[in-house]
Amino acid sequence: MTQDNHVSIRMYNIGFGDCFLLKFPAPKRHRKVLIDCGVHFLGRNKEQPFDDVVKQLIEDIKEDGVPTIDLVIATHRHQDHVSGFENEVWNDVEVGEVWMPWTENYEDKQAIEILLSQSSKAKKVHQLLDKMLTNPKLFGLEHQEQIDQIKEIKGFSENSLKNPEAMNMLHHGFKRKNDIPRKYLPFRDRQLNTIKPDFLPDVTVHVMGPSFDDKVIASMEPPKAEQWFKMMEDRGNSETPPVFPFHADWSRKPAELATANEILGRRDRRRIQTVDDDTAFNLAKGVEDAVNGTSLMMMFHVGNAYLFFPGDAQHGTWQSALEDDEWRELLTKTNFYKVGHHGSHNATPKEFVHKVLRAESKCRAMVSVYPVKIFEQIPKDKLLADLVALPAEYVRSDKVVDPGDPEGFVRTPLYVDTKIPI
C-alpha cells in the first residue's frame, strides 16, 4: 500500500470548464481518476493556453514515462467538459475504463432519441445565429452592440453542439481504442449503482444520476420554440426588411379603439408575458439546460473521505437524489464538494447547503470557473457566502479570493491541489 493516508484532488485552471484529477492510495501505485477535461469557447483562460494545461495533465499522469489513467469519467458532452479530449495526445494514453452517462449509450433507444433531439435543436439554434450574423440588417441588428450580443450567444450555443472529435475519443479512442471497457451509468437497476471497482481498491462509487424518472427525462428535451424559429427563418429567406412593432402601420389612435371591449384576449396577454422565452439566448440556454440534465452525479467514498462530484446536474437530478433516503444520508457526509455547474444558481440547491451539508463534516469545496461576460452571475456570490457560513472552505480555479486561499489548498498558476484524509 502507498504510504499516503489521503486522497489528493487537483483542479486545473483551464478557464470556464472542468478538469479534475483524483489520486487514490493503493498497493504499489496510486490509482488515478480523471473527471472531465474541457473549456468553454467563451471562457478560455487568456493567461494559460488550454493545450498547455492538457500537456501538464499528461505529464502529471505518467508512470515510468507512460501516461496512464485508471478511469476517465465524462460527466456529459458539453464543450466545457469534454473539448480537451480533442487533443491527439490522448491517443497515447493508457486508460483502464471510461464512464459516461447512460444517455451516451448508442445501443439504448431512449438515449439515442434524447441525443438526436438535443443535437438537432442545438444545431438549429446555431445555424440561425450564424444567419443573423451573416446579414444582420435583415434581422433588425442595426448596432454593433446588438451584433456583439448575438456573437456571444452563438459562442454560448457552441457548448451544446455534438463535439464529435472529443466524443469519438471517449467512445472509441485512447491507446487501446475499443478494447477499453466503457460503462454507461447509472444502471437501471438501482442496486447496481453502488460500485466497488477492482482497479480502485477500497473505493466505493455511488452513482446518483442522471435520473430515469419520466419527469426528469422530459426536461432533457430542449424547448421547441417553433414560433421563434419560423419567424427567424422567414426573415432569413426574405429580401424585404422586417416590420417592427410601433411602426405606423401597427398603431391606432385612441379614438379608433373600442374602449368598452377588452383590447387583448387572454392568449394575447400570455404571449406578451412570455415573449422573452423565445429570445435567442433563452433558446440556447434551454438546450444547455437539457444537456446538463444528462450529467453524471457521483460520490466517491474511501475511508473517511466522501467526495461529491455532481457535474452540471440540474434540478431534476438533484431532486431525485435528495428524495432518495439512502442518497440523502450519504450526501450529509460530504467533506469535498465540486461545486456544481461552476457555481451557477440552478446547480446547487439551497436544500443541499442549508439542510443536508453538515458543519461537522468540515467540507472543502472547489469552484472551477472563469469570468465570462454573458455569465455575470456565475459563480453566484450568495451561494459562495452560504458555503462559508456553513462553514465550508472553498477556492476558485481562476483567482485567489480575499483574504487568501484557506489552509489546506495549494495553488500554482496551472492548478489548485487539496488532500482529503481517509
Image (spheres, helix red, strand yellow):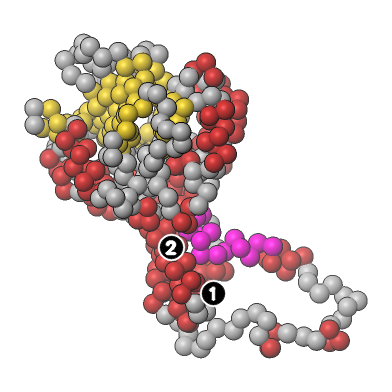
Residue depicted at x 35% and y 47%: 15
Residue depicted at x 50% and y 52%: 376
- From the top left corner, tell me how far across and down residue 221 is, in percent: 50, 51
Q: Spot the residue most to the right.
A: 260
In front of the other: 21 or 300? 21
- From the top left corner, tell me how far across and down residue 198 is, in percent: 25, 19
Main SS, magenta residues: helix
Give the labeled residue for mark 1.
231
Q: Quadrant of residue 351?
A: top right
Relative to 183, is 134 above or below? below
- From the top left corner, tell me how far across and down residue 165 is, in percent: 24, 52
Q: Which type of secondary structure does the marked residue at label 2 adopt?
A: helix
Residue 283 belongs to the span the image colors magenta? yes
Relative to 319, is 280 above or below? below
Q: Spot the residue most to the front.
A: 403
Residue depicted at x 69% and y 62%: 273
* Residue 81 shown left or right of residue 394 in the figure: left
Query: Is the residue marked by circle 1 packed among few (<14), some (14-19), or many (20+) residues within 10 Å?
Result: few
Residue 261 belongs to the span the image colors magenta? no
Query: Is the residue marked by circle 2 packed among few (<14), some (14-19), or many (20+) residues within 10 Å?
Result: some
Residues drawn in magenta: 273-286
* Residue 100 shown left or right of residue 231 in the figure: left
**Residue 208 - label:** none
The answer to whether the residues at label 1 and label 2 have Cβ atoms under 8 Å apart is: no
* Residue 39 shown left or right of residue 156 in the figure: left
Give the labeled residue for mark 2.
152
Q: Which type of secondary structure does the marked residue at label 1 adopt?
A: helix
Name the amino acid type tagged 2: Glu
Tell me if residue 360 can be seen: yes
